[in-house]
Image (cartoon, helix red, strand yellow):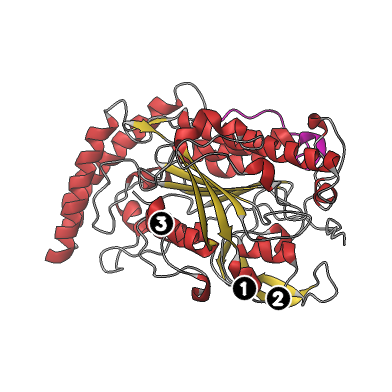
């Protein structure tokens, strides 16, 4: 049965998730922003004042997390590599990742077992469970089959937001959700959730995302030097006003502020090092505005959204992001591949239709090329002793394993980057486990000690072989 849900009339509202920060400092008597105001420091300084919890600035670059989504399943025979764990050979779909084979981990055999529970049709469950690992909530959105109970949203937090809760509080933007043609507002179009029934709509315009993220960043050739001078003046202000602030604090709070001052001194040192964290901060160049919803502009939107997100991470504006290419049941047309068929329609053709199978293969190969382009962007940014790619993990997900059967076992997962060495790469892993275990393992890679993720019923534990 065809499940064409692209009739949605509304479009997602422009959005980059940036909740008000409420983390207290000095027993909650002086807020983080209040502390900055006390010192006469502006908002641009906030990324450089990371010690208001009494913690030291990390000596190594921070870890980042990115979700990369493409829809409608894949062709397993053309996706699964040949060979063993280290001597694997990419087949047709993942072949564009060959230049990054030492930086990726391909995983076969993860099963969305959580989708065996709760309401929804195949696409609804796939999209709502892929990052949450928990059931959909009941609602009034009917599925693509008569027997499917209607749903609303996913019933739990998504892994990107769980990680953002842990590492996203010290950057101006807790997380950044970007997309190309995500469609309307329903469970087919949302993968990121702050919590049960709390979807985060992605920003579909790279221009609006750019304006939101880089409005305060100098854009001319001397902008970076002016920013460095500003950082220096901020550090001077912190040290100059320290004595005045001391008189307002008790002995315990004074000791905590001493820790902060030690880190400020360390930051001064690091700002003078050519390879210091943040040295590669550059706002991306943007073309003149165009219609971001036009099918013919889809490729350009994809490229610009990746530019925006990588620049935001290089500038440490955020450490968590997502890139959603269309949506579940997406009906994109890819004329640059030499055909005009709609993606979801193609995905429902039978295995015996070799023409359709080849077209689906080419579509997924194109998304592999886009994924490789994202890894190349990250690798081009020097950071510490390595690159931004070394300190990031990009998780490529799909809401289905195979489109024409709506199967959600043997899901196609590719990891790019090692999250600062927390994950082992250059591997092809075969396993038979619930995909919740991967979500839990990703949390563990970022220092989160949760015992389970999503519905505990579908957890068997951390995938130790993925961790270093």
User: Helix, strand or loop at disc 3?
Assistant: loop
Type of secondary structure dominating the magenta stretch: loop
Q: Which is nearer the eye, 299 or 98?
A: 98
Q: Which is nearer the eye, 446 or 318?
A: 446
* Mark linked to residue 84: none
- Mark positioned earlier in the residue sequence (2 or 3): 2
Residue 91 x %, y % = 63, 36
Residue drawn at (75%, 40%) of the image: 292
Q: Are marks 2 and 3 in contact (CB under 8 Å)?
A: no
Please say whether residue 286 is one of the residues in the magenta stretch. Answer: yes
Q: Which residue is mark 3?
A: 169
Q: Which residue is mark 1?
A: 135
User: Helix, strand or loop at disc 1?
Assistant: loop
Residue drawn at (65%, 57%) of the image: 201
Residue drawn at (87%, 62%) of the image: 1
Q: Are marks 2 and 1 in contact (CB under 8 Å)?
A: yes
Residue drawn at (31%, 54%) of the image: 38
Q: Which residue is mark 2?
A: 119
- Disc 2 from disc 3: Cα separation: 34 Å
Residue 192 x %, y % = 59, 59
Residue 213 x %, y % = 54, 43
Dot 2: within a 10 Å radius of its alpha carbon, few (fewer than 14), some, or many (20 or more) residues? Answer: many
Q: Which is nearer the eye, 148 or 174?
A: 148
In the rendered structure, which segment of residues is drawn in magenta? Answer: 283-297
- Disc 1 from disc 3: Cα separation: 28 Å
- Disc 2 from disc 1: Cα separation: 7 Å
User: Helix, strand or loop at disc 2?
Assistant: loop
Dot 3: within a 10 Å radius of its alpha carbon, few (fewer than 14), some, or many (20 or more) residues? Answer: some
Point out the frontmost of discs 2 and 3.
Answer: 2
- Mark positioned earlier in the residue sequence (2 or 1): 2
């Amino acid at each position: 049965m065809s499940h064409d849900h692209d009739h949605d009339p509304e479009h997602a509202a422009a959005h980059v998730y940036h909740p008000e920060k409420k983390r207290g400092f000095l027993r909650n008597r002086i807020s983080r922003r209040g502390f900055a105001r006390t010192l006469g420091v502006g908002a641009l300084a906030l990324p450089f004042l990371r010690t208001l919890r009494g913690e030291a600035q990390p000596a190594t670059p921070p870890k980042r997390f990115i979700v990369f989504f493409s829809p409608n399943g894949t062709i397993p025979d053309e996706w699964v590599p040949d060979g063993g764990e280290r001597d694997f050979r990419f087949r047709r779909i993942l072949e564009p990742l060959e230049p990054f084979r030492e930086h990726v981990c391909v995983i076969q055999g993860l099963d969305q077992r959580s989708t065996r529970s709760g309401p929804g049709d195949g696409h609804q469950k796939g999209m709502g469970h892929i990052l949450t690992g928990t059931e959909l909530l009941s609602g009034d959105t009917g599925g693509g089959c008569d027997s499917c109970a209607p749903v609303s949203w996913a019933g739990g937090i998504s892994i990107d937001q769980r990680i953002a809760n842990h590492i996203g509080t010290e950057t101006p933007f807790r997380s950044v959700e970007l997309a190309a043609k995500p469609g309307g507002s329903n469970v087919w179009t949302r993968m990121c959730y702050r919590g049960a029934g709390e979807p985060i709509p992605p920003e579909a315009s790279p221009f609006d995302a750019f304006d939101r993220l880089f409005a305060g960043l100098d854009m001319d050739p001397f902008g970076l030097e002016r920013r460095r001078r500003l950082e220096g003046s901020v550090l001077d202000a912190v040290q100059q006003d320290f004595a005045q602030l001391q008189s307002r604090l008790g002995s315990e709070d004074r000791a905590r502020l001493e820790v902060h001052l030690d880190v400020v001194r360390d930051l001064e040192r690091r700002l003078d090092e050519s390879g210091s964290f943040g040295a590669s901060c550059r706002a991306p160049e943007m073309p003149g505005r165009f219609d971001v919803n036009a099918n013919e502009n889809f490729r350009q939107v994809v490229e610009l959204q990746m530019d925006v997100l990588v620049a935001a991470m290089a500038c440490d504006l955020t450490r968590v992001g997502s890139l959603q290419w269309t949506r579940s049941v997406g009906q994109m047309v890819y004329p640059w591949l030499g055909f005009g068929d709609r993606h979801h329609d193609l995905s429902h053709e039978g295995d015996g239709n070799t023409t359709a199978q080849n077209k689906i293969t080419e579509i997924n190969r194109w998304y592999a090329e886009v994924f490789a382009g994202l890894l190349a962007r990250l690798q081009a940014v020097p950071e510490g002793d390595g690159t931004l790619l070394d300190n990031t993990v990009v998780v490529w997900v799909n809401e289905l394993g195979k489109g024409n059967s709506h199967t959600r076992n043997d899901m196609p997962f590719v990891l790019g980057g090692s999250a600062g060495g927390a994950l082992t790469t250059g591997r092809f892993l075969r396993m038979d486990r619930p995909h919740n275990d991967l979500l839990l393992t990703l949390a563990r890679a970022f220092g989160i000690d949760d015992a389970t993720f999503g519905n505990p019923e579908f957890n068997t534990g951390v995938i130790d072989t993925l961790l270093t």
